[in-house]
Image (cartoon, helix red, strand yellow):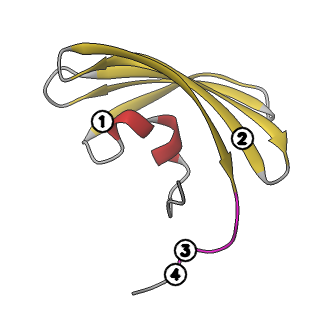
Amino acid sequence: MKLCVPKLVMLAQFEHRNARCSRSVIRDNGSAATVHYTCVGGDFGQSDLRLVTPRSLSIQTQGISGGAPFKYTLLARRAGDCQSH
């Protein structure tokens, strides 16, 4: 799937990318970070982001969305700037 992500924080809360959420960075060592977030309505999640190459990230995320658990891994790769419409 090709998706324009104008803000990197959207990858940290990918399951809730359109929701209003507050975030806390639990760990950040430059090439890896863990972000915990809580959203309006009670949903929440935690994501581990790891730099694979200068243009790609591995994101392991889990939490609760719409009252149900989720857990999956994403691979994000920078393909260029977002196009304006």
- Farthest front residue? 1
The answer to which quarter of the image holds residue 81 is bottom right
At 54% from the left and 74% from the top, the residue drawn is: 82
Question: Closer to the N terminus: mark 2 or mark 4?
Answer: 2
In this view, 11 is above or below 24: below
Query: Which amino acid is tagged 2?
Result: Leu
Q: CA distance from mark 3 to mark 2?
A: 17 Å
Mark 2 = which residue? 57
Q: Amino acid at mark 3?
A: Cys
Mark 1 lies on residue:
21
Dot 1 alpha-carbon crowd within 10 angstroms: few under 14, some 14 to 19, many 20 or more: some
Quarter of the image where one finds residue 33: top right
Q: Residues within 10 Å of mark 2 (few under 14, many from 20)?
A: many
Marks 1/2: CA–CA distance: 21 Å
Q: Are marks 4 and 1 in contact (CB under 8 Å)?
A: no
Mark 3 highlights which residue? 82
Q: Is residue 73 left or right of residue 4?
A: right
Query: Is residue 24 left or right of 68 when viewed as pictured?
Result: right
Q: Position of residue 78 (x, y in %)?
A: 70, 59
Query: Do the numbered discs 3 and 4 sit on residues whose CB atoms are within 8 Å?
Result: yes
> What's the amino acid at mark 4?
Gln
Give the magenta-colored segment's residue range: 78-82
Give the CA distance from mark 1 to mark 3. Answer: 23 Å
Q: What is the magenta segment's predominant secondary structure? A: loop
Q: Are marks 2 and 4 in contact (CB under 8 Å)?
A: no
